[in-house]
Image (cartoon, helix red, strand yellow):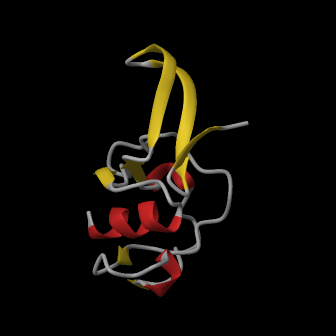
Amino acid sequence: MADAAVVCRELDCGEPVDALANAHLMGAAHFGPGLETIWMSVAMCTGSESTLKNCGSLGQVEQGCGSYGDAGVICSGVRLVGGSRCSGRLEILHNQTWMSTV
């Protein structure tokens, strides 16, 4: 959750609700595989850092590792409106104001 707190803070998306550890043992990341190169392997944050790049890590991912092991974070600063609990328009909390995403 310390890593998730830093990610939510950096994205200005509230507090961490859940940290979804990479699922490399199951063969799939929770939100699906990422589309870019993985630049950090095993972030080691204390939770007080302002950005993920200020956290320690075990270094860059080794060659041959894919995005199947991407970690995920759920932050409190997002909500769905105009629908039900599981559907609707996505809004994010930005500078204390709820805004629709494009």
Name the residue rendered at 40%, 70% in the picture. Answer: 6
**Residue 20 in sight in this render:** no
x, y percent for residue 98: 54, 41
Q: Quadrant of the N terminus?
A: bottom left
Give x and y (percent) for residue 41: 45, 74
Q: Which residue is drawn at 41% across and 19% down?
A: 86
Q: Where's residue 79, x and y in %?
A: 45, 33
**Residue 87: where, in percent of width, then height?**
48, 17
Looking at the image, which residue is at 68% across and 59% down?
36
Residue in the image at 33% along x and 79% along y = 44
Q: Is residue 85 above or below residue 30?
A: above
Residue 91 image-quadrant placement: top right
Q: Quadrant of residue 100?
A: top right
Q: Viewer-proximal residue, 94 or 11? A: 94
Q: Nearer the viewer, residue 1 or 95?
A: 95
| Of 53 and 83, the residue lying toward us | 83
Please state, as top left, top right, bottom left or bottom right, where the C terminus lies in the image: top right
From what the image shows, is residue 15 above or below residue 26?
A: below
